Image: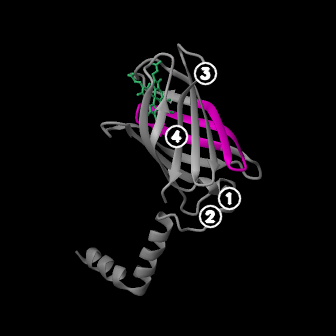
Amino acid sequence: MLCRGVRILSLHSVRGRNLLYQRKKMTSGEAPLHDLIKPLGWLLGTWRSEEGFGHYPTIKDFKYGEELQFFQVGQPNIQFSFYAWHADTKKPMHREIGFIRIKPGTNQVALIGAQNTGLAEVEEGHVEGQEMKTETQTLARLSFGTPPAIRKISRIFKRNGDVLEQVLSMETENTPMTTHLKISYQKVN
Ligand code: HEM
């Protein structure tokens, strides 16, 4: 009871309000960009598309929508979430969250991601100007994951003004490296 009282009082104090303000700034992406991730600053923000195109030799072509968020809190990493939905029904589909890091003093990047399908992955690659290319270095999947097993993923993100393009290719146990997704997002925030 006493602890709760102290906490409420402290949130109403000048220091408490400053702390809250700082925390809000950090979580809303207003924190100063860490020097190490400045080469990836062009990714930051919210990107959205209703015009994603999906293809793979083993499935029917499909359309989808997706929103990407890239944000930072002053640490040397960018946090991301990718949320896709069905083009017609708008039902949630593929979802992925993770972080992007840069090897200090280089243009070498690592993308560390977890997918709702049960895949966890580290991709590595490079950033050159406003283009980032990565491919799988390490991959883990559920012991009860749905086949076919993924062997490798490769992605290219490229920004051109307020448009961000992504091309994602994958190799499975049955199919060699082939493009699965092509999508152009508009910057919405
Ligand atoms: C890293 C990201 C992704 C990976 C690794 C991945 C992986 C796969 C795999 C392995 C398959 C089955 C292919 C086969 O049967 O040979 C598949 C199918 C499919 N994927 Fe993805 N996918 C990804 C992202 C997405 C996204 C963003 C969407 C957007 C909605 C999507 C929609 C689909 C659809 C609709 C199918 C066909 C499902 C079916 O016919 O049952 N995928 N994906």
Which secondary structure lies at badge 1? Answer: helix
Mark 1 closeness class: few <14, some 14–19, many ≥20 residues within 10 Å: few
Q: Which residue is mark 2?
A: 33
Mark 3 closeness class: few <14, some 14–19, many ≥20 residues within 10 Å: some
- Pointers 1 and 2 in contact (C-beta within 8 Å): yes
Q: Type of residue at label 4?
A: Gly
Earlier-in-chain disc, 4 versus 3: 4
User: Mark 4 or mark 3: which is in front?
Assistant: 3
**Image point (69%, 54%), residue name:** 39
Q: Which residue is mark 1?
A: 38
**Which quadrant of the figure has residue 139?**
top right
Q: Type of residue at label 2?
A: Leu
Q: Disc 4 to disc 3, how far (Cα)?
A: 20 Å
Earlier-in-chain disc, 4 versus 1: 1
**Image point (49%, 60%), residue name:** 189
Q: Which residue is mark 4?
A: 113
Earlier-in-chain disc, 1 versus 2: 2
The residue segment tinted magenta is 110-138
Residue 105 location, x and y as percent?
77, 52
Q: Say if 75 sits above or below 122 in the image.
A: below
Is ligand 1 within 8 Å of the beta carbon of the residue shown at mark 1? no
